[in-house]
Image (cartoon, rainbow, N blue to C red):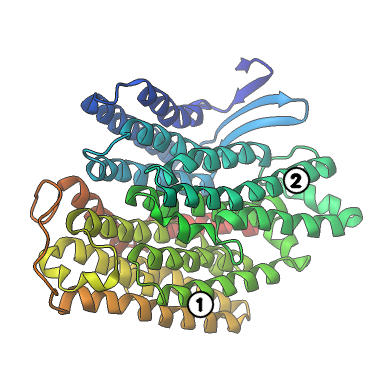
């Protein structure tokens, strides 16, 4: 199928384009809809999310059950190809993004009911998801860079949505971190292109062929990419934007932590190690150990800083800094078991963290609660929300049989298998810190008496809060428990992580 200067390949090759277009077109249409046309805007939002889910389900069926390939390649310039491709790793991230976008859309509709500038919010919200699925589907570094920078541009208006001095200051901080990170990624892409030309993810023999004459440059390039991806992944000391950005509305916080920005950075590190350099070469070249140390420092630092936070969303933000680095740590340990733990945590962390932010938003929107001390007795007033928070918090700690236990089990046993016993110490210390900053929240919420009567609910009542606020939190909490309970089932996140790892180590 010819098209302009390029061609689409493989049966059903335009399906990746349709997946991207489902949210891109929705975002552009929403900008054109009158601010007062609430029902039409909601129909476009939900309809686009459902279409994306259906398309992703069709792709999932084709790839997992029939080993089908879906790619679209278009030549931008000679030697520069725009490539969308579905492999198991991209399918992993794509499925997570699509499912959580639908749930976050429902949540955002309920959360922003009656708020101003909803047209602007949902327009950029859809464009943000477009960037996220584009990152998932990118088949080479050039395509990845395009969507990675598009993500920066589309999330900034969401961070500053309220337009206050504090939100604008947070937006400036966000750009001060992410724009240099984008510049570093551009440098890395151009530099690697000058050495190797354009090559697709998975063509790792290209790097091996360059190594004999360009070993030093490849080493420097690796850490340039780590720097670029580390900003969005919030690796220490590149993490400063993330706690500041918590001033954004709860749906934005959920999106930033579970689906979009930090997960895009972690996904970039996975692509770098597995599909640009290849795990075998990265290990032989001694590139993985410094990355593992950096991830370990971030895990412990984020957990320690979370312990000191009194604001609920800031505690969750520092928890994200720690938890997302499990992904980098696992991929930096040379061995298939730890890699499985890294990959499965990409999904598990997303489900647990989005649940926590949904619940934090419910407390804030329903009862005006923002600080941990204000949660005293909230479990009696909002038992379902507090129950969802409890499930996700136990998951973050790693209590069996939650999703977090599965991740930590594979990371720990993988570290032992690889002879990296020090990693187990990091995981144990992190788990103890996780318990230290989550268990007091649960104790305060369930067992302390409120200091004063609860304020009237700010939203329509359904048991304890709005349906659109409660249901997404309950669904994601149930999913975070189910992926732990049924981890051994076919086509579970763990099963797909095993399949991805087998292919990675077979290269």
Closer-to-camera residue (502/298) = 298
Q: Is residue 12 above or below residue 316?
A: above
Q: Quadrant of the C terminus?
A: bottom right
The residue beneath circle 2 is 187
Single out the mark in the foreground, 1 or 2: 2
Q: Is residue 342 above or below residue 92?
A: below
The residue beneath circle 1 is 412
Q: How many tags in the picture?
A: 2
Whole-percent x, y for residue 379 in the image: 15, 69
Dot 1 lies on which element? helix
* Residue plotted at (60% across, 24% down): 8
Badge 2: residue crowd in 10 Å (few <14, some 14–19, many ≥20): some
* Residue plotted at (67% across, 58% down): 226
Mark positioned earlier in the residue sequence (1 or 2): 2
Whole-percent x, y for residue 441 in the image: 28, 74
Q: Which mark is residue 302?
A: none
Q: Is 322 positioned to the left or the right of 107 in the image?
A: right
Whole-percent x, y for residue 413 in the image: 51, 77
* Residue 124 seen in the current view: yes
Q: Quadrant of the N terminus?
A: top right
Q: Is residue 4 above or below residue 312?
A: above
């Amino acid at each position: 199928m010819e098209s302009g200067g390029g061609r689409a390949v493989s049966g059903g090759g335009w399906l990746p384009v349709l997946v991207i277009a489902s949210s891109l077109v929705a975002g552009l249409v929403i900008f054109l809809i009158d601010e007062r046309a609430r029902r039409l805007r909601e129909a476009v939002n939900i309809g686009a999310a459902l279409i994306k889910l259906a398309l992703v389900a069709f792709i999932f069926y084709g790839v997992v059950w029939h080993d089908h390939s879906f790619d679209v390649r278009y030549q931008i310039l000679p030697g520069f190809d725009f490539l969308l491709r579905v492999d198991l790793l991209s399918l992993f991230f794509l499925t997570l993004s699509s499912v959580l976008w639908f749930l976050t859309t429902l949540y955002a509709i309920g959360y922003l009911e009656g708020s101003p500038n909803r047209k602007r919010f949902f327009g950029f919200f859809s464009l943000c998801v477009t960037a996220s699925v584009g990152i998932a589907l990118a088949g080479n570094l050039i395509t990845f860079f395009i969507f990675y920078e598009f993500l920066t541009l589309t999330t900034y208006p969401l961070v500053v949505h309220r337009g206050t001095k504090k939100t604008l200051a947070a937006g400036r901080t966000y750009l001060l971190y992410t724009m240099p990170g984008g510049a570093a990624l551009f440098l890395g892409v151009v530099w690697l292109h000058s050495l190797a030309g354009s090559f697709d993810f998975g063509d790792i023999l290209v790097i091996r062929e360059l190594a004999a004459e360009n070993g030093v440059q490849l080493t420097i390039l690796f850490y340039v990419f780590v720097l670029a991806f580390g900003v969005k992944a919030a690796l220490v000391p590149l993490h400063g934007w993330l706690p500041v950005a918590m001033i954004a509305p709860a749906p934005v916080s959920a999106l930033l932590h579970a689906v979009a920005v930090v997960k895009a950075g972690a996904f970039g590190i996975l692509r770098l190690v597995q599909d640009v350099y290849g795990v075998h070469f990265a290990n032989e070249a001694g590139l993985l150990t410094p990355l593992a140390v950096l991830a370990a420092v971030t895990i412990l630092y984020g957990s320690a800083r979370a312990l000191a936070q009194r604001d609920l969303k800031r505690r969750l933000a520092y928890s994200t800094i720690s938890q997302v680095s499990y992904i980098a740590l696992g991929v930096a340990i040379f061995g298939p078991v730890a890699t499985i733990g890294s990959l499965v945590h990409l999904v598990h962390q997303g489900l647990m963290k989005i649940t926590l932010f949904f619940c934090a938003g419910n407390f804030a929107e329903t009862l005006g609660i923002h600080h941990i001390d204000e949660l005293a007795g909230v479990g009696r007033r909002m038992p379902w929300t507090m129950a969802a928070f409890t499930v996700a918090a136990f998951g973050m700690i790693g209590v069996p049989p939650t999703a977090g236990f599965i991740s930590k089990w594979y990371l720990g046993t993988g570290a032992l298998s690889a002879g990296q016993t020090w990693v187990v110490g990091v995981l144990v210390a992190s788990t103890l810190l996780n318990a230290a900053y989550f268990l007091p929240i649960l104790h305060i919420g369930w067992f302390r008496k409120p200091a004063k009567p609860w304020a009237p609910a700010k939203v329509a009542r359904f048991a304890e809060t709005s349906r659109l606020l409660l249901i997404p939190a309950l669904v994601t909490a149930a999913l975070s428990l189910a992926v732990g309970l049924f981890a051994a089932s076919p086509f579970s996140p763990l099963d797909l992580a095993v399949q991805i790892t087998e292919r990675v180590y077979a290269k």
